């Protein structure tokens, strides 16, 4: 189904974005 594929792509984008933000935040805080 096209609808589920769109949701899957949105989820992937959201997860990759949040992961990048978390890594950037942790690096900026000096946790790494």
Image (cartoon, helix red, strand yellow):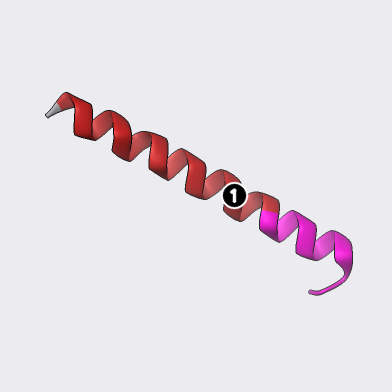
What number of labels is visible?
Answer: 1
Q: Is 27 within the magenta?
A: yes
Secondary structure predominantly adopted by residues drawn in magenta: helix
Q: Find residue 5 and report its image quarter.
A: top left
Q: Is residue 13 left or right of residue 20?
A: left
Is 26 drawn above or below residue 21 in the view shown?
below
Q: Which quadrant is the C terminus positioned in?
A: bottom right
In the rendered image, the residue lying farthest to the top is: 2
Q: Is 15 within the magenta?
A: no
Q: Residue at horizontal 64%, vertical 51%?
A: 20
Q: Find residue 6 and report its image quarter.
A: top left
Q: Residue at horizontal 59%, vertical 55%?
A: 19
Q: Which quadrant is the N terminus positioned in?
A: top left
- Residue stretch in magenta: 22-32
**Helix, strand or loop under label 1:** helix
Q: Which residue is mark 1?
A: 18
Q: Find residue 17 and report its image quarter.
A: top right
Q: Position of residue 25 (x, y in %)?
A: 78, 57
Q: Position of residue 7 (x, y in %)?
A: 31, 34
Q: Residue at horizontal 69%, vertical 50%?
A: 21
């Amino acid at each position: 189904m096209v609808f589920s594929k769109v949701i899957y792509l949105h989820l992937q984008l959201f997860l990759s974005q949040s992961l990048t933000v978390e890594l950037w935040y942790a690096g900026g805080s000096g946790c790494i």
